[in-house]
Amino acid sequence: MALSYLASSSSRSNLLKPLSAALSCTPSFRRPISSAADDTRTLTIETSIPFTAHQCEPPSRSVDTTPKELLTFFRDMATMRRMEIAADSLYKAKLIRGFCHLYDGQEAVAVGMETAITKKDSIITAYRDHCIFLSRGGTLLEIFSELMGRQGGCSKGKGGSMHFYKKEAGFYGGHGIVGAQVPLGVGLAFAQKYSKDGTVAFALYGDGAANQGQLFEALNIAALWDLPAILVCENNHYGMGTAEWRAAKSPAYYKRGDYVPGLKVDGMDVLAVKQACKFAKEHALKNGPLILEMDTYRYHGHSMSDPGSTYRTRDEISGVRQERDPVERVRKLLLSHDLATEKELKDMEKEIRKEVDVAIAQAKESPMPEPYELFTNVYVKGLGVEAFGPDRKEVRALLP
Amino acid sequence: MTVRDALNSALDEEMSADPKVFLMGEEVGEYQGAYKISKGLLDKYGPERVLDTPITEAGFTGIGVGAAYYGLRPVVEFMTFNFSMQAIDHIINSAAKSNYMSAGQISVPIVFRGPNGAAAGVGAQHSQCYAAWFAACPGLKVLAPYSSEDARGLLKAAIRDPDPVVFLENELLYGESFPVSAEVLDSSFCLPIGKAKIEKAGKDVTITAFSKMVGYALKAAEILTKEGISAEVINLRSIRPLDRPTINDSVRKTNRLVTVEEGFPQHGVGAEICTSIVEESFGYLDAPVERIAGADVPMPYAANLERLAVPQVEDIVRAAKRACYRSMPLAAAA
C-alpha cells in the first residue's frame, strides 16, 4: 500500500518553519524498525520548499524515497553529527592539532548527494571534508586516526583534517586553499568526459569561495567545453567571520553562473538535496555544467579556533537548530510516517554514540607514523635521489 | 634537428603512444602553438586532445591538475613561465604536494611546459627565470633542456613520469639546430631525470650551466682552452633533482667551480650548487666558488642595458680565470 502525502497549500516561504505536522497521516499500526529498515516501497514526500531555478526548469518538489532510505538518512546524519561533536572534544583535549573545520548542521548535503549518485561519480570539496569522506565510504576509525595524526588515518597521518582522500570511491579531497578545488573539480569532469565514463563531478565550495576568480575561469571552460561538472555552493552564509552580504554584491550564488543554469535548494532538507543532485547529474551529462546552491548552516564556528558567536547571534544559531535541523527533520518524518518509534531512534543514536567512542578508542591505539615516513610519498618515482632533514649531515634519506 | 622540432616530435610520439596524454594551453591548437611547438598536433589528434584554452591560467591549470588526479596525463603549456605565476598555487599546492598529503593515493602525472627566462627585448614582466623557485619545492621535478637531444629525451621522460614535472624551455633555443643520432630519433628514446651531462670534459675548472647558458659555457670553454685552461662543462639538464654526485665528482677532479645561470642571483640555482660543494667537497676546493647569474634588477628593455643584465660569454671566462687565480685585477664597482 503506497503512502503518499501531499503538502497542504499553506505558504512555505519562511525558511524557519518546521516540517509541518499538517501533513496528515492515519497511523493504523506500528511497524518495528527492523522491518522498516528493509522496506523498499516508494514513499513520495514533498520538500519543505520548492526549488528556485535560474535558466532551467526546476525539478518537482515531490521526492521518491523508501522507509529504508529514510532510516539510512537518519543513521548516516546522526553518525556524522556525533562524529563532529566528538572531534570537537578531541580538539579541546589537544589530540587534534592545527585546523579542524566541523560540518555539523550541513549533514543533509553530504548524505543527500551521496544517495543521488554512484561511487564512480566524483566529489571534491574544500577543508570541511570529514562528513563527505564518511559518506563516500570512509570509516570512523580512518577519520579519527587521521585527525590525530596516526598511521591508521586515511592519509597515514600525513594529511590531517583538511586532506582526506578516497580515490577508489571517487573522493578527491580535502583541499586547504579556498576555491582551488573548483577548477580541480572541473578537471575531474573533463577527465570523465575524455574517458567516456558517463559520470559527473561535484565540486563543492562555500559562499566565501564563491567570489574566487578561478571559479569563474573554470566555469567558463566547463560551459565552453560542455563538461559534466556540477558546482555546489554550500552556502552556510558565513565565509569565516564575514557574512555573505558583506562579501558578495550578489549573494544569489545559484545565479552567479550567468549563462550556466542554477538551482537553489534547501540544504537542510536531505530529500531536496537528493532530488537536486539527481536532477543535476542528469542535466550535466546532457547539457554541461550547472550550479546548485545549498542553503545550509554550520552550528560550529568556521573552525575550532573560531567560537562562531562574534559575528552571529546565539539566537540565530539556536533558531536554526530548532526549526531546520536536518537530523530532526528526518526524525519527524520517520515518526510521522510510523516507520520508527522515538525509543528506537534514541536507541539507534545510543548505538551510534558507542560506535564513535569505540572508533576513537581504537584510533588512540594507532601509532604515530614511523620517522622514515617523513620521506615517503614525496614522489611516486623517487629515482633514488637524496632528501634531507633540517640538519642534512644528520638526517638524509634516499627517495624510493 | 631544431629544438622546436625535437619538442614537437616528442609530443607527437608520446601522444601517439598513450591515449591519456593530451595538450592544453593558449594557442596550442589552431594557431599551431604560440612558438609553433605544437604544430600539426591538432590536425593529427583532434580538438579533444589538443585544447585551446581561454586566457585563464589559474582556471585551466587547475583543470589540468584535476584531470591528472583522475588519471589522465595532461601537458599544460604556459605561453611563457611568467604567466605560470597566475597558476602557481595549483602547481605547488594542488600538484606538487598531493601525493605526499594523500600518502600516495593521489598522484599527479602532469607536465607544465613552456619558455622560461629572458627572450630578446621583451622587458621586465616577460623575462624572469623560474628555475630556482620551482626547484625549491619538494614534490616537483624541474627539467631544463639545452640541445635537441635534451629536448626530446627530457620531454619524453617528463610525460612518462608519474610525478608533476616543470619543463623549462627557452624561446631563443627553439630555432637552434643540433646534430642528433639515430638513437635520439627513435620513438623509444628517453633521458633519465636527475642526471646531468658532461658536455665537455676538462681538468682545471668545472662550469655548471643549464638551458641557453650551456651554449655560452661551451663558448667560454673554447676561449679558455686557447688560454691554457681546460674547463669541464656540465649541462645540468635536471634542476630538481639536482645531480649532486656528478657535480661533486667533477669538482673533486678540477678543484674549482663556476656556476652559471640566467636567473636572479639571490637564492638561485648557483647558490644551491655552491652550498652542495661546500657541504660535500669542501676539502677539494682550491678557490672560492664563482657564481655568474643575471643582474639583480628587473630586466630592462634598452638593448645595451639588457645585454648588461644577462650573463655573457666573457663573464664566464673572467670568472673561470678568477677561479684559477689567473685573472686581471677585478674592475672597480660601477
Image (spheres, coloured by chain):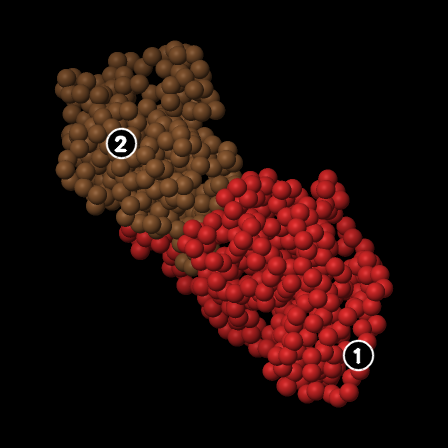
Chain colours: A red, B brown
Instruction: Name the residue tied to disc 2.
Output: B5
Nearer to me, B171 or B96: B171
Instruction: Name the residue tied to disc 1.
Output: A25
The answer to whether residue A348 is seen in the rendering is yes
Residue B257 percent across, percent down from the top left: 26, 30
Nearer to me, B210 or A209: A209
Residue furthest to the right: A10
Q: Chain of mark 2?
A: B
Local secondary structure at mark 1: loop
Whether discs 2 and 1 lie on one chain: the answer is no
Q: Alpha carbon of mark 2 to alpha carbon of mark 1: how far? A: 76 Å
The answer to whether residue B213 is seen in the rendering is no
Q: Quadrant of residue B2?
A: top left
Residue B141 percent across, percent down from the top left: 36, 43
Quadrant where the N terminus of chain B is found in the figure: top left
Density class for disc 2 (Cα within 10 Å; few <14, some 14-19, many ≥20) is many
Total marks placed:
2
Residue A81 percent across, percent down from the top left: 66, 68
Nearer to me, A341 or A44: A44
Q: Closer to the observer: label 2 or label 1?
A: 1
Q: Quadrant of residue B129?
A: top left
Q: Residue at x 34, y 37 (%)?
A: B43
